[in-house]
Amino acid sequence: MCSAEQVSGRDRILEEAAALFVRQGYRETTLRDIAAAAGMKAGSIYYHFDAKDELLAAVLETGIARITRSFEETAASLPDDVAPSERLRRHVHAHLAALFEHGPFTTSHVTVFHAAPEAVRALGTPSRDTYERCWSELLADLQRSGHLRAGIDLGLHRILLLGAANATLDWFDPTGDRTLDELATALTEQFWQGVGTPVDAPAPAPNPAPSTRAAARRAAAPTTTRNRAARNGTPAAPTRPKKEPTP
Amino acid sequence: MCSAEQVSGRDRILEEAAALFVRQGYRETTLRDIAAAAGMKAGSIYYHFDAKDELLAAVLETGIARITRSFEETAASLPDDVAPSERLRRHVHAHLAALFEHGPFTTSHVTVFHAAPEAVRALGTPSRDTYERCWSELLADLQRSGHLRAGIDLGLHRILLLGAANATLDWFDPTGDRTLDELATALTEQFWQGVGTPVDAPAPAPNPAPSTRAAARRAAAPTTTRNRAARNGTPAAPTRPKKEPTP
DNA sequence: GTGCGCACCTAACGGTTGTTTGGTAGGTTC
DNA sequence: GAACCTACCAAACAACCGTTAGGTGCGCAC
């Protein structure tokens, strides 16, 4: 019987390394950890990679390549008559899906990149620029067509949007009671129309009881999701999932 | 001449450790690094702290205490008749100021907390909850008074807001061409009213040339600030500043 | 069946790290 | 001036980690 996951040694190492980097951090993960997960011994890794840093670089490169391709596929899949805010929402969804559903490679860019040695970061920067440009052009296009307000600082708001999206990694659990789609919708809504009531000044009609049952349930619920054994986000990138459920 | 910074040994260690943790990461910073920065030898740290982990715990605790106090001081300083969105903006500003202007202690919560050993994280969690509760209550209050839309998932939007705020650490430079105040304003605006044009569907009047000179300058500028030798934000927490400007 | 290269193993080396141990200079107390 | 406490230093230790060198079994070519 030919096993379902018939991955070559190199790919196996890459995959286990990415998973461990995301779960434990780069420095906290030893080559002996990776080798054990891949079913071999530490020294054998050097048959496929020249150094630990190079392994990290390969993981990061794979991650950014995947999310960039995901962006392009999303763009290609959009109907011609898609509403502008829906167009954005689909891209936000794709970004989140890459983080939560496409394995640990893309995730490593959020979790591990900043801890990478200078040389590795320098190597990975051009690919990150490419992905960044996709978003810049998307937003610029939306602004040109009049769907994003003129006069706003587009670069700034793009980073804020993606910052919020990436930060979800620290608390969101796609198998929890919020779906990834709901998350994408909420994030897009906050970016697009905000959550304030239209007029600011005097006082609008105060909110009475929450208007829907779903809203009521949420208002009563604790202030934040606590799935995945992770904590929510304040003021920092919060706790990552426990390294191992105490055995 | 009595030196201006006449800090005790313990406080000196704490301060240098926080700075190094933020700049290099926790695991990447050795006790010998910290000791050298504090003007002593590695073994001497053990006179003040029992272990490296305990030193990290002290740094984190100081950070969360400071930002929580900053929140409370901001709340106390608000005039009674402050507009709701301005009230939020002031708190956003205080949060960002704590990250960028109050030394490395608060910053360490964003940069280092997720890399901390389980035991340290568990120790720091209650204080983080306290700060989180401040924000929950602020937003709940704004919603009760009708200034935030009813029916939205407040906990979710709070995490998205703070996620975006914390992510600014990776690219924003308060000495650059955007001020911290402008950043707070933009972030609040994006949260409060969004950046989309009011109506979605057909096509509003396409944006002609940018309407102000400032907007024109920004539109022409590169897509993101690149101050501080840091990169912008995609898809991940981007590069931190170089460890040392090559000497 | 000999030769050869691929994919791995065994075992070690050198360096670094958190930590410990035994001291010691300087000030204060009595 | 003896005892004592504070705040450090010097030197080492054990553990661990990335990395390397040399070896081994297996499959394929011929």
Image (tube, coloured by chain):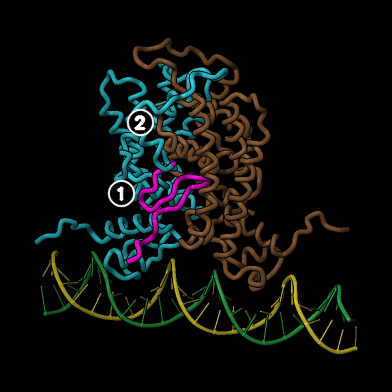
Chain colours: A brown, B cyan, C yellow, D green
Whether B65 is among the magenta residues is no
> What x and y, as percent, mark residue C28?
13, 64
Residue type at mark 1 is: Gly
Residue B244 in magenta? yes
Highlighted range, magenta: B223-247
Which chain letter goes with mark 1?
A: B
| Residue at position x 48%, y 26% in the image | A148
Residue projecting furthest to the left:
B1
Q: Residue at x 40, y 16 (%)?
A: B145
Q: Residues within 10 Å of mark 2 (few under 14, many from 20)?
A: some
Helix, strand, or loop for circle 2? helix
B109 sits left or right of A232 in the view: left
Residue A108 percent across, percent down from the top left: 57, 52
**Which mark is on residue B221?**
none
- Relative to D16, residue B207 above or below: above
Q: Residue C26 vs residue C11: left or right?
A: left
Q: Is residue B134 visible?
A: no
Amino acid at the residue labelled 2: Thr
Of all chains, the one bearing label 2 is B
> Which residue is under mark 1?
B103
Which mark, residue B185? 2
